[in-house]
Image (tube, rainbow, N blue to C red):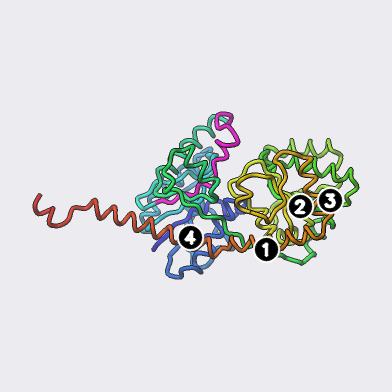
Amino acid sequence: MRLGIDAWGLGGDLLTTGMGQYTRHLLTSLPARDPQLAIVAYGGPAEERPGWLPVEVEWRAVGRRMPGKLTALHSRTVALPAQVRRDRLDIFHATAVHMRPVFPPVPRLRCPVVVTLHDLIPQTYYRVSTLPLRQQVFYRWNLSRAVTSDRLVTVSEHSRGDIVSRLGIDRDRVEVIHNGVDFPPNPDDRPLARLGLRRPYLLYAGSYEPRKNLAGALRAFRSLVDRGHPHELVAIVEPVSGHRAAAIAELESLGVSNRVHLLHSLDEPDLRSVYTAADLVLFPSLAEGFGYPPVQAASAGVPAVASDLPVLREVMGDAAIYAAAGSVERLVEAIESVLTDPALRARQIEAGKRRAQQFTLTRNARAHLELYMKVVDEGAARAQAATPSQAAGVEA
């Protein structure tokens, strides 16, 4: 089987997002799962082959630079179909449904297409109508292309429920495959000094995006400082964001700037060191499709405090301490329970290690491979049914 996977932007900061990690894990784990599988990864125009990409995976930089924001559109609607025909793919996997036109739309190809729709947060948490007009048009158009693909994948039962109820899709057309996580602890403390970090600290893993609730984390941290806790706060965020200015203003108004460290663009060994050395990982998000950071914390042997969202309970089970989403008071109580109760902390670490075993890359790759084979077989059966038999042709 020849499989194509959209790998747009994975040589840059897009790699650090949940969508980027999802795609990277597929590209690195599928070759080991099935050595007979031929995989082609498709980047953007002139995009260099990522250094982490396995040698078994072919690389294609597709399209050319276009004026304004037309590059991604041209690459995936004009250049990609022609390249896929030349590559003779059996199936293509679009690993995200983007909402901004600077990113690639879901392609329509002659071969079957599987699309991963991680969540419907633009509809369930944000109102699409509040987005800039260009984004509204692009997101709705891109979503319609995803819906008409051969099969949808999503990363939690919670997200599947949203997709089925809001988009009117048959439940059987949406496959749930939980994300795979490979995030062992890294006890090497040397990166901490290089990054200017000192123990003890709490780790916020998220972004500047409002739904990730950095503001809530900062307010909870201010309360902990007032209560005499010696910790600092380390926040892993993106390097550039339109929401950064508001977050910095909140930080300065709280008067704790000297105890908060904002980090971004960490390589994986450094990121694992930062996780491993934390007293706990704080994930106060207000809306999620899956939630990587609590699972990464569990894998690294660090307790997690997370918002009490149905999707996070689905993913983490008893391996996290939950606080009412949006309540700073409850967040502080949850954090203090972990910091002040060694027995609770030990139980959470052990529960986390058990939970992390449910999200292995091997299990994730196997589920995707089974889905690819099913979709290819279904496509072949449809093609055969649509082709008149030789006898029928003679009778006609």
Q: Earlier in the sequence, mark 3 or mark 4?
A: 3
Q: Earlier in the sequence, mark 4 or mark 2?
A: 2
Residue type indicated by callout 4: Ala
Tell me the magenta residue range: 113-131
- Quadrant where the N terminus sits is bottom left
Residue 238 position (above or below residue 38): above
**Where on the picture, by quarter, is residue 247?**
top right
For residue 353, the mark is 1
Task: Sort mark 4 into few (<14), some (14-19) or many (20+) by Cα contacts within 10 Å.
Answer: some
Q: CB under 8 Å between callouts 1 and 4?
A: no
Q: Which mark is residue 367?
A: 4
Graded by Cα atoms within 10 Å as few (under 14), some (14 to 19) or many (20 or more), the crowding at tag 2 reads many
Dot 3 corresponds to which residue?
A: 232
Residue 203 is labelled as: 2
- Which of the marked residues, 3 or 1, is nearer the chain's N terminus? 3
* Label whose residue precedes the other's in the sequence (2 or 1): 2
Q: Is residue 16 above or below residue 56?
A: above
* Sequence-first disc among 3 and 2: 2
**Mark 4 near mark 2, Cβ–Cβ under 8 Å?**
no
**Residue 352 point in image, percent of width and height:** 68, 60
